[in-house]
Every structure is written in structure tokens, then in C-alpha cells.
Image: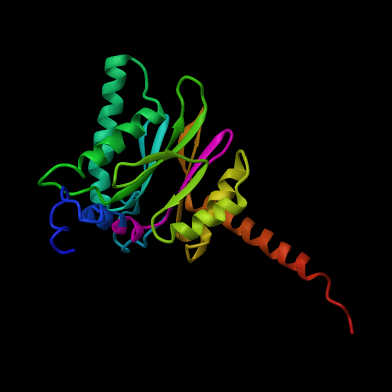
């Protein structure tokens, strides 16, 4: 194997590109990110790292805006994400300048995935060590969309998905609990999914909501903790109802 993992352009005899697989491993070790597409709302949620006491938490973001109607969350290497996001933002503005229309979510997803794929097929470079969840509203039809890309350059559309650490557990939760939701219910589903793998409740969760009219809005920590408290109360009530009334001896 050692002979085949030194260059990204060399296939192993069994058809693997080891550098791409190592990039996927970097994604699996990154903080969890989840995206949920509702009928009128799209929610992105990420697991927050604890910041140093003297560090400004606003400078450490995993949810970023690409355009007025498109946002992105990522899992993996933050420095790689910064480069990819800057390229995507320039493409969004270039498209507006050239075509005089905003990009569609699928267009910018194809652009990002194409860039990621290019870095798996060129000498002297390495793959981007990030996986992205791209959300937004179609500027022509107003339909919400959620896409995922990975270091290999593959992309696909989803109703709800997760990436990063323990993403399989989050995805299984979403598969069992996903229904077409709107408004607050979409936010609750995303937070409940993250709580499957995130400890310390709302303190370590960052949530962004996108609507067609208001665009992207990051929830304050107090708002997230309020929703988490509501979810915990619902869980406790459901557990009490399942156990039934206590019989007196």
C-alpha cells in the first residue's frame, strides 16, 4: 500500500486512491454537521468546539454564507474550507456580474464538487479535507434545496443528511424521524439529531436557519438552549407517559 499512497494521481491495484480516502478520514474526525430541508425552512447545525477563554468565538465558524440565498456548513479541515468557500463566493459574484442573475444551489454545488474533484486528479496537490452541506432556495422557483459534497468531488441532493464525527448515528436518527416539516419543527429535528452525538446540550451546538424571505440567521446561544430545554421536557414527558402512572401499594 505504501507505494500507492504517495501521490494522489496513482491508483492502487485494487482501484483505490488512498489520498482521497485519507481525506475522507479527516472529514470523519471533524466536528459533526447536519442539514435538514423543510417545506419553507432549511436548517444547518454544527457541533461547536470549545474555544479558549480569551478567543473571540465569532471568528470560529463552521456555517458560512456564500450568497444572499445560499449557505454552507462543513466538516473537516477549517483552513481547506476557507479556501473553498472564498472560491465559491467569487464564483457567485462573478455569475451575478456576467449573467445578471444569482446562482442556483445546484450550480454552485457543481462548482464546489468540480473543484474538489480537480484536486484528486492533478499532480503536486492534495484533496480538500472537507465535506460540505450546501443549502439554499432556488432564486427562480423558491424551492429549498440541500446538497452534500465530499473530497472525491461527488455530490448529491438530500432531504436531510449529516457529515463529520459519528455522522452514521445522526443519519440513522434522521432516517427514522424525518418527515416533511416546516418552521420550528424543522429546527427541532436538526437539534435532536445533533444531540445524538453532542454532549453538554445546547452549549456546544451552533444552529443557522434559512428562509426564503429573511435569508440566513444564526441563532443565539440562549435561543438554542431554550429549544434544547423544550426537547428535553418533551422527552421526559414521553418517558413518564410510557412508564404509566405509579401504582400505590
Residue sitting nearer the eye, 137 or 12: 12
Say if 81 sits above or below 106 in the image. Answer: below
| 34 w.r.t. 235: above or below | above
Is any part of residue 246 visible from this angle? yes
Q: Examine the image and state in which quarter residue 56 appears.
A: bottom left
| Residue 4 picture quarter | bottom left
The residue range painted magenta reads: 25-45
Does the magenta run of residues contain 183? no
Q: Is residue 68 visible?
A: no
Please report the residue visible at 33 percent of the width from the left and 32 percent of the height from the top: 110
Compared across the picture, whether 24 is left or right of 207 comes to left
At 32% from the left and 64% from the top, the residue drawn is 53
Residue 20: x and y in percent read 25, 52
Horizontally, residue 176 falls left or right of residue 27, namely right
Residue 181 x, y percent position in the rendering: 62, 40
Viewer-proximal residue among 245 and 114: 114
Q: What residue appears at the point 46 percent right and 26 percent down from the top-left corner?
A: 138
The residue sitting at the front extreme is 13
Q: Is residue 247 left or right of residue 150?
A: right
- Image quarter where the C terminus lies is bottom right
Judged from this view, the residue extending furthest toward the left is: 124
Say if 63 sits above or below 22 in the image. Answer: above
**Magenta-drawn stretch contains 38:** yes
Give the quarter of the figure containing the N terminus: bottom left
Q: Position of residue 241 (x, y in %)?
A: 78, 65
Relative depth, front residue between 223 and 161: 161
- Please provide percent x and percent y for residue 68: 40, 29
Question: In this orientation, which residue lies closer to the viewer: 131 or 245?
Answer: 131
Q: Residue at x 25, y 56 (%)?
A: 14
Residue lying furthest right:
249
Amino acid at each position: 500500500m505504501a507505494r500507492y499512497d504517495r501521490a494522489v494521481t496513482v491508483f492502487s491495484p485494487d482501484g483505490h486512491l488512498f489520498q482521497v480516502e485519507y481525506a475522507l478520514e479527516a472529514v470523519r474526525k471533524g466536528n459533526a454537521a447536519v442539514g435538514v430541508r423543510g417545506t419553507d425552512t432549511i436548517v444547518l447545525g454544527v457541533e461547536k468546539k470549545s474555544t479558549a477563554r480569551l478567543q473571540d468565538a465569532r471568528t470560529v465558524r463552521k456555517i458560512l454564507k456564500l450568497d444572499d440565498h445560499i449557505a454552507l456548513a462543513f466538516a473537516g479541515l477549517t483552513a481547506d474550507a476557507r479556501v473553498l468557500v472564498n472560491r465559491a463566493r467569487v464564483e457567485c459574484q462573478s455569475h451575478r456580474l456576467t449573467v445578471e442573475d444569482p446562482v442556483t444551489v445546484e450550480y454552485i454545488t457543481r462548482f464546489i464538487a468540480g473543484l474538489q474533484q480537480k484536486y484528486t486528479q492533478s499532480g503536486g496537490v492534495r484533496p480538500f479535507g472537507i465535506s460540505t452541506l450546501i443549502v439554499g432556495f432556488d432564486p427562480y422557483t423558491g424551492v429549498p434545496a440541500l446538497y452534500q459534497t465530499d473530497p472525491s468531488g461527488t455530490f448529491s441532493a438530500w432531504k436531510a443528511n449529516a457529515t463529520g464525527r459519528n455522522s452514521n448515528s445522526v443519519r440513522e436518527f434522521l432516517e427514522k424521524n424525518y418527515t416533511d416539516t416546516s418552521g420550528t419543527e424543522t429546527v427541532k429535528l436538526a437539534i435532536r439529531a445533533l444531540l445524538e452525538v453532542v454532549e453538554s446540550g445546547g452549549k456546544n451546538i451552533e444552529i443557522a436557519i434559512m428562509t426564503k424571505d429573511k435569508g440566513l440567521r444564526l441563532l443565539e446561544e440562549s435561543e438554542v438552549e431554550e429549544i434544547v430545554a423544550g426537547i428535553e421536557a418533551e422527552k421526559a414527558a414521553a418517558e413518564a407517559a410510557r412508564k404509566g402512572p405509579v401504582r400505590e401499594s
